[in-house]
Image: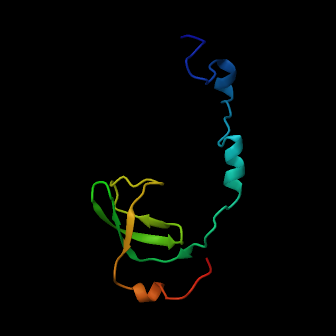
């Protein structure tokens, strides 16, 4: 076995007794993970929503866990392949809208 592997992971007897420690975050990520940099308040609201993929026009029925002015956290069916950062058009199902929304002016 070659002692010069193509990966940066060191091999050899000292690392077998004590595995190497790799940082979980990069230096910039530590600062980013330690602060909450959200500009909008998240509200814990559970309601049915439809996620519409604009490219393929697929519609997916999901349930929200929290909603903010800048985004929504939703759970979908297992195996569909939703990932953080994907862009969908969100449509709130008509049932229970009066319960979670009110028409009032908010500061911009």
Q: Looking at the image, which is closer to me, 47 or 53? A: 53
Q: Position of residue 21 (x, y in %)?
A: 68, 34
Q: Looking at the image, which is closer to me, 48 or 19? A: 48
Q: Where is residue 90 in the image (x, y as percent from the top left)?
A: 39, 68
Q: Which residue is drawn at 39% across and 55% down?
A: 82
Q: How is the image coloured?
A: rainbow
Q: Furthest residue to the front? A: 108
Q: Residue at x 53, y 67 (%)?
A: 70
Q: In this view, does 97 lie to the left or right of 14?
A: left
15 in relation to 47, above or below: above
Q: In which quarter of the image is residue 34?
A: bottom right
Q: Residue at x 61, y 70 (%)?
A: 40
Q: Position of residue 44 (x, y in %)?
A: 53, 76
Q: Where is residue 45 in the image (x, y as percent from the top left)?
A: 49, 77
Q: Which residue is drawn at 38% across and 65% down?
A: 89
Q: How many marks?
A: 0
Q: In this view, does 96 lie to the left or right of 37?
A: left
96 in relation to 87, above or below: below
**Screen quadrant of the C terminus:** bottom right
Q: Looking at the image, which is closer to me, 69 or 21? A: 69
**Screen quadrant of the N terminus:** top right
47 in relation to 34, above or below: below
Q: Quadrant of residue 19?
A: top right
């Amino acid at each position: 076995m070659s002692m010069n592997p193509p990966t940066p992971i060191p091999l050899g007897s000292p690392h077998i007794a004590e595995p190497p420690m790799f940082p979980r975050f990069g230096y910039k990520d530590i600062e980013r993970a330690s602060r909450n940099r959200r500009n909008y308040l998240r509200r814990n609201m559970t309601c049915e929503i439809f996620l519409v993929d604009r490219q393929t026009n697929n519609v997916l029925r999901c349930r929200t866990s929290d909603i903010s002015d800048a985004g929504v956290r939703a759970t979908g069916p297992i195996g569909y392949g939703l990932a953080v950062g994907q862009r969908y058009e969100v449509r709130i199902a008509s049932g229970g809208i009066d319960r979670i929304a009110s028409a009032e002016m908010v500061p911009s």
